[in-house]
Image: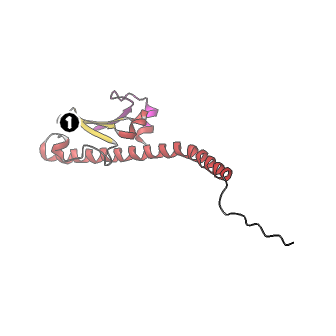
């Protein structure tokens, strides 16, 4: 009597599929926090670049008008592209101003750098950061937020 050859079916078994899914889940759970931190830092960098551009626009405006201007007057954007930070300008005078960047959307999870403040006073520039609008981080945390 002649036996017929058995043909093995192609594909994955349920056990193999479960193991592959578990491995993918573990890898994703390890990779996501690192990706999230890099994405926050990237959005913060975009905000810092926009603040520097706003500072340059303020200086151009002041050279022609003798004072610093509002965001609308200087023609600057009130938010970073992608709306990760919103900007406001305050404490306007002939010798200085403040720019406050406030995190929005998913950027609010960047707790220590949620608020970024740039202060120009008489030609002196200072930077601060914080988790609220007091921007009272210690110097080491400020460096983390501003030195990306």
Residue 64 in sight here: yes
User: Over which residues does the magenta segment extend?
Assistant: 120-143
Check disc 1 and report the residue beneath it.
95
- Residue 132 lies in the magenta stretch: yes
**Left or right: where 60 falls relative to 112:** left
Residue 148 higher or lower than 108, as above or below? below
Which residue is most to the bottom? 2
In percent of width and height, residue 101 lies at: 31, 38
In percent of width and height, residue 15 lies at: 68, 50
Q: Quadrant of the C terminus?
A: top left
**Left or right: where 62 falls relative to 133:** left
- Residue 27 lies in the magenta stretch: no
Residue 127 higher or lower than 59, as above or below? above
**Left or right: where 30 falls relative to 144:** right
Quarter where residue 29 is shown: top right
**Left or right: where 11 falls relative to 107:** right
Crowd tier of the residue under label 1, counting other residues whose Cα lies within 10 Å: few below 14, some 14–19, many 20 or above? some
Which residue is most to the right? 1
Which element carries disc 1, helix, strand or loop?
A: loop
In percent of width and height, residue 128 lies at: 36, 33
Which residue is most to the left? 65
Residue at the image position 79 percent from the left and 70 percent from the top:
4
Residue 123 in sight here: no
Nearest to the observer: residue 72 or residue 31: 31
Q: In which quarter of the image is the N terminus?
A: bottom right
Nearest to the observer: residue 35 or residue 63: 35
Residue 125 higher or lower than 24, as above or below? above
């Amino acid at each position: 009597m002649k036996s017929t050859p058995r043909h093995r079916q192609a594909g994955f078994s349920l056990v193999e599929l479960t193991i592959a899914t578990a491995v993918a889940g573990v890898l994703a759970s390890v990779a996501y926090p690192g990706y999230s931190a890099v994405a926050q830092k990237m959005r913060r960098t975009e905000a810092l670049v926009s603040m520097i551009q706003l500072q340059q626009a303020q200086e151009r405006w002041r050279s022609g008008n003798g004072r610093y201007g509002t965001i609308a007057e200087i023609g600057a954007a009130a938010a970073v592209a992608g709306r990760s930070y919103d900007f406001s300008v305050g404490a306007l005078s002939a010798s200085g101003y403040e720019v406050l960047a406030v995190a929005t959307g998913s950027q609010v999870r960047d707790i220590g750098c949620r608020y970024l403040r740039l202060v120009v006073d008489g030609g002196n520039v200072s930077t601060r950061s914080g988790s609220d609008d007091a921007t009272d981080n210690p110097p080491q945390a400020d460096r983390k937020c501003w030195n990306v």
